[in-house]
Amino acid sequence: MRARAGASDAIRALMDLAPPMATVGRNGVETKVPTAGVAAGELVVIKPGDKIPVDGEIVEGASQVDESMLTGESMPVKKGVGSTVVGASINKSGSFRYKATKVGADTALAQIVKLVQEAQNSKAPGQLLADHASQWLVLAAIVIGLLTFSVWYWVMGQTLLFALTLTITVFVIACPDALGLATPMAIMVGTGLGAMNGILFKNAAALENATKLPVVGVDKTGTLTEGKPTLTDFHVQQGFQHEQVLRIVASVEAKSEHPIAVAIVQAAEQQNISLLPITAFDSVTGLGIKAEVTGQTIHIGADRYMKQLELDVTPFENEAARLGQEGKTPLYVAIDQKLAAIIAVADPIKDTTYTAIAGLHQLGLKVAMITGDNRHTAQAIAAKLHIDQVIAEVLPDGKVDALRQLQQQYGRVAFVGDGINDAPALAQADVGLAIGTGTDVAIEAADVVLMSGSLQGVPNAIALSKATIKNIRQNLFWAFFYNIALIPIAAGVLYPAFGILLSPIFAAGAMALSSVFVLGNALRLKYFQVPAIKA
């Protein structure tokens, strides 16, 4: 029991992260109340050095917040009005007030604790084998015990006391305690350690399956990149005015929440370009946008959308190739069925992505990028990151088919995503890993949640899985070896030749020692360190 309690230190540590008291504004007065007493909608006051008690949204002030205890990321995060804060994170410099949005069991910390507990209580596929082995071991012990008694008492003519002593020794030695503890203890420690490092395994099966992956599929936008593109290029055809086309495009994109749309609108705002009213708007899934602006029909989208509209994109062919080679995403603008402009946005690659890809390669895994982006752009980004395989120009509903192709090619496949359109692919994958900064739908569909927005969590999760499963195998080997080696000795096979017998007291001690060994080996996982990435 003490060892099991030791394996749950991670859960207790997580629960202790939340401060016991919170400062709230009630009736115009700042009042100290227990964190459990904070109600949704209340204003919480945070000063420098304070722990944030519950989840919420900042309504006044700004600061830097350390979220490392939940995400594993060491750098503080800038927070201002409108920013969300998470309970148990630590305020660093400034002071602010925020409105509590999630309290009690609804907080992110409480959900993490719940996920860890569920994972620790779940059974890995390998545990089923251990359970069956334990059942057969008990049956074998009964049979061997009865045979031991029969042989020594009736065949060898030994005394009743002698035969009973050996029989009891066999039963004691064969007790499958170590075998039963081998898998769950390692899982408890492994999932708890993962939670402390921002890696949440929803079940033990995900922990085991993560060790059997030859390839990892990754989404591009928001996973490999920041998900915050900026407008970099804007070229118009002869006969069109730059400012007027930008005004039309920004007016249309203002109706969309896509990151690319946001980048275009921001570019127009920076140039103080006013927007026009939109009389019609329609999003064409996987292709682009159709809208009506001041009586003109506007189409914005990829080259395949223009080709569907039977528009010739060859005037921008060289420009599109150049933009793609630079890792930029080209989009075309058509006004009243005439090609008007080509624009490009660039989404910076996350700094941690390079080391994450290198880490996956170091673990012996291939990386495949699955994206709806232009093929030239996808290839350019893949070359920068040394990605092994590219599946580009995939429609939102085509990611599942792309994963099935990879599964046919490699067998087991993991997929990393963050958006709503990634949810089906996350569910299709043998192991789905969701970036914790992504959508709730994606997180719900995934098997593993990476609390940080960094892809580095993927090789870390796989390395931890490998270490945990290796630990389980060590435990199972010891448990089987112990029983296989000592049961025959307990039955007295060495007595005729060497006069060696095991007493029930020694057998009990050996049984206890076997369990202690298994538990001690499982607890070694607490000191697991992620392998250093070789440059």
Image (cartoon, helix red, strand yellow):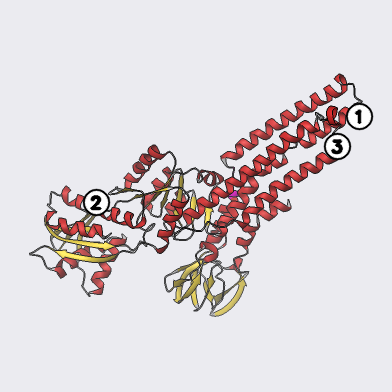
Q: Is residue 291 visible?
A: no
What is the three-letter code of the residue carrying label 3?
A: Ser
Of labels 2 and 1, earlier in sequence is: 1
Residue picked out by circle 2? 287
Q: CA distance from mark 2 to mark 1?
A: 85 Å
What is the three-letter code of the residue carrying label 2?
A: Leu
The structure residue drawn at horizontal position 55% and vertical position 61%, both measured from the top left corner, is: 109
Q: Are marks 2 and 3 in contact (CB under 8 Å)?
A: no
Which of these two is toward me, 379 or 202? 379
Q: Is residue 217 visible?
A: yes
Residue picked out by circle 3? 503
Q: Position of residue 61 (x, y in %)?
A: 45, 78
Relative to 497, 485 lies left or right: left
Q: Position of residue 427 (x, y in %)?
A: 43, 45
Range shown magenta: 118-123
Local crowd size for mark 3, using a 10 Å CA cut-off: few (<14), some (14–19), many (≥20): some
| Residue 398 lies in quadrant | top left
Q: Position of residue 345 (x, y in %)?
A: 26, 62
Residue furthest to the left in view is: 239
The residue tagged with tag 3: helix, strand or loop? loop
Local crowd size for mark 2, using a 10 Å CA cut-off: few (<14), some (14–19), many (≥20): many
Of labels 2 and 3, earlier in sequence is: 2
The structure residue drawn at horizontal position 15% and vertical position 55%, both measured from the top left corner, is: 317
> Which-is-in-front pick, marks 2 and 3?
3
Residue picked out by circle 1? 161
The structure residue drawn at horizontal position 16% and vertical position 70%, both measured from the top left corner, is: 243
- The question of residue 122 being in magenta is answered with yes
Which of these two is toward me, 64 or 327? 327
Of labels 3 and 1, earlier in sequence is: 1
